[in-house]
Structure formats: C-alpha cells, structure tokens
Amino acid sequence: MEKATAARFFGQAAIWGASFTFIKFALEEFSPNQLVLFRLILGAATLAVIIVFTGRSFKLTSKAWFHVAVSSIFANVVPYLLLSYGELHASAGLAGVLIGGTPLVTLFISTLALRDEPATGRKVTGFVLGFLGVSLVVSPWKVEGSSLLGALACFGAATSYAVGYAYVGRFLSPLKVDPITLGANQLVAAAILLALAVPFFTWPPIESVSAIPLLSLLYLGVLASGFANILYFRLIQDVGASTASAVDYVVPVFAVLFGAVLLLEPLSWNVIVGGAVILIGMAIAEGRISSSAFSQASSGKVNNS
C-alpha cells in the first residue's frame, strides 16, 4: 500500500472510529430515521459544495447513476439505519466489533463476484487475524447492556457494508469516475430513497436540540458521510473491495483511542495487543509478512542466519 493510499486508509478509519460515539450522542435527541436522513443530506451538501468550488462535474451517465443508486442502498441507507437502531439496544463497543466482521464478509462476497479478488490463503489468514485483533481491542464480553436484537442489527449493517464494497468494486470502480462525483451522487441517491420512505417511518417532533447532539449530527454528516465517502470510493479504486474493507479492522482501534484521549478512558493491555494483532494481520493480507514466516516466528523457529 502506497503512502498516500495508507494515509487515506487510516484517515477513513479515524473518521469512522469516532462515529460510533457520535451516533450515541446524536440519538439522545434524534430518532434513528431523523439521524440518518439529516446525516445523508449534510453529507450530500458537503460534497456538492466541494464539486462547485473545485469546478468538477456532478453529472453521471444513466448507467453509472443506476449503479450509484443501488450501491447507496447497501453502503448508506441500510447500514446507517441498522447501526442507528442497533445502537439503541447495543453498546458502541459491541457495534464496533460486529462492524469489524465486514472485511471477512467482503472477502467471501468478492471471491464469488470479483474474478480479480480471489480469497487467497494469505488474505484469509490476515483477515482472520484482523478480526481476532478487533475482538481483543473491543472485548465485547466485558460490556453489558446489549441485546440480541441490537447485535443482529449491527451485524446486518456489517453485511450490508460488505455487499456495498463488492458492488462498487464490480460496477463502479471500472468506470474510473472521480470519487467526489461518485460520493456526492451516492449520498444524494441515498437521501432521496430514504426521504421517499419517510411516510412509512415514525417521525417524532423535534422540539429543541442541545449542542452535543447537534454537533454530533454535523460530524456524522460532514465528515463521517461526506469526506469519508470520498475516501471510500478512492480506496476501492486503488486497492480493491476486499482490501479497502479492511479499514473496518482499524476503526475500533481509533474508537478506543478517541475514548482514551477525549474521555480519559484507560488503555488496557487488550487494546495494545489487539492493535498489534490487527496490524500483523493487515501486513500478512498485503503480503508484507508471509503467513509461514509469522507461524515460524510465533513458534520461535525463525532462522536468524
């Protein structure tokens, strides 16, 4: 992975890592439906402003726009709704570890749908290690207050994200369209689709909004949906769907680090060890470390000659 690509990879992970906490804050005064719709509108508006000021084109061919609309269902509408509902009944930590399953599901789907992204032994080994690292970082067994319904909703979001990665890799990446144009159109499509479904949702009145939920909503819309969507499309174009999805292994690490810095939450041993396991898994998946060499190192059989 090149330096610029790695910067986009970890930048997206950092933005998404903070989003679980901000979803919790925003849900204090917004319903899940309101949160997702406002988030999509803010994200679309952010990218539209960037397009205007940079002189880019907003237009897509009818074929590209169709695929953008379909991908918006799996990458935005469904997972955003499921995560918002899921975090009403599950902890942010549990949501993080379940979203950490996205790369493994993406690898499976990509193997079936994308001929140029086979599930090699190296990738499988690296991705399994990555998921184990996520589990260590989040340690969901230590967290109380989560229900089966909430967990299923969060895992449903992970599965939807995986389908979105594979769909974009199969139908949109080959078109080589500017990521900002793709991102803006996808968020517009997602906002329109969700707005059409508004009459079927419960829509409680918003009487007043305090600063923290409002700022959380702005973060989720402008950064976690707007700017992160640009990184999302660019990464899939650069490294493929399965490798791009590995960002969801690093997301929980940043979520914990943000908690330590902003909320003064303690960093325990499992965070450090889990983070190291994630990085080793990613290195194996990318071929920077061979799985056989890692096995030998783990058993103390590395030849130092």
Image (cartoon, rainbow, N blue to C red):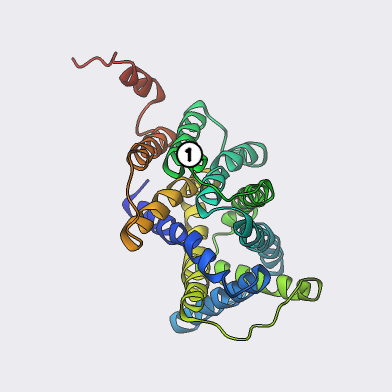
User: Which residue shows up at 51% across the image and 46% down it?
Assistant: 143
Residue under numbered circle 1:
135
The x and y percentages for residue 260 are 33, 55
Q: Determine whether 244 is above or below 26 in the image.
A: above
The x and y percentages for residue 86 are 63, 56
The x and y percentages for residue 152 are 67, 47
The x and y percentages for residue 246 are 48, 45
Between 30 and 79, the one nearer to me in the picture:
30
Between 222 and 217, the one nearer to me in the picture:
217
Q: Tag 1, which secondary structure?
A: helix
Q: Is residue 181 visible?
A: no
Q: Is residue 154 visible?
A: yes
Q: Is residue 154 left or right of residue 267?
A: right
Furthest residue in direction left, as rendered: 305
Between 261 and 282, the one nearer to me in the picture:
261
Q: Quadrant of the C terminus?
A: top left
Q: Determine whether 103 is above or below 88 in the image.
A: above
User: Which residue shows up at 39% across the image and 20% down it?
Assistant: 292
Q: Quadrant of the N terminus?
A: top left
Q: Determine whether 116 is above or below 217 in the image.
A: above
Q: Residues within 10 Å of mark 1 (few under 14, many from 20)?
A: many
User: Which amino acid type corresponds to the residue marked 1 in the rendered image?
Assistant: Ser
Q: Determine whether 68 is above or below 210 in the image.
A: above
**How many numbered dots are placed on residues in this image?**
1
User: Which residue shows up at 46% across the image and 52% down it?
Assistant: 238
